[in-house]
Amino acid sequence: MPDERLAEVRPVFRFIVGLGAAGVVILGVGLLQFINFEPSGQHTGLQARILGFWDYDQKTGTITGDSKDHFKTTEQLAAEVDWTTLPPDLLVGGHWFSGGFALDAGGVGPARARDLIAKPAVPLRPPSDRGTPPGRYTFVVERYYRDKPVEVLARASVLVIGGR
């Protein structure tokens, strides 16, 4: 009789142990990714300055008008960064993300901060010729180490709404 009960419980026990092992593997992979993308000792305390979001003239590569916090889907836009607030030799980049950091929507870098001073406007690159899809877009200035982003120096969001 005790062998029959043990035989009934054994598959459930093995399943639970298997789930536990899978959880340990997932935790280990997550820890390795964290160590890879967030190496210890990489926090500098530096902050970049995003001056705002502007209409962008693609032909001249310049920003125009007044700073805004929302744009229409038909408007081109760019973030303006004051790269002079960072040490000249610092390896940095500025990148646009959409969909909760899921899609890269353009940017500059990685490059030395001194090399980006001449390019303060970083345009958002629409994923299609139809304009920018509605949604929230986030612009992030990051510090790089060995061509890998290791520290966020500034972050700001802008809203793109439908309409003409």
Image (tube, rainbow, N blue to C red):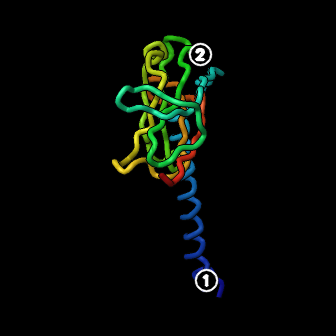
Which residue is tagged 1? 3
In the rendered view of the protein, which quadrant contains the N terminus?
Answer: bottom right
Residue 99 image position (x, y, % from top left): 51, 50
Query: Which residue is drawn at the image coordinates 40% and 44% (left, top)?
Result: 126
Q: Amino acid at mark 2?
A: Thr
Residue 154 placement (x, y as % from top left): 60, 29
Residue 85: mark in rendering: 2
Residue type marked 1: Asp
Between 130 and 142, the residue placed more toward the observer is: 130
Is residue 88 positioned above or below 51 on the image? above
Q: Is residue 95 above or below residue 92?
A: below
In 3D space, how far apart are the residues under numbered discs 2 and 1 (Cα atoms)?
74 Å
Q: Quadrant of residue 81?
A: top right
Question: Can you give x and y, in whole percent of width and height, for residue 72 in the image?
Answer: 50, 47
Query: Where residue 19 sits: x, y (%)?
Result: 56, 64
> Which residue is at a point 44% across and 42% down the rendered structure image?
104
Residue shown at 55%/76% (left/top)?
11
Give SS at disc 1. Answer: helix
Mark 2, other Cα within 10 Å: few <14 / some 14–19 / many ≥20: few
How many numbered marks are there? 2
Point out the residue furthest to the bottom here.
Answer: 1
Q: Kindly report which numbered mark, 2 or 1, lies closer to the viewer in this rendering.
A: 2
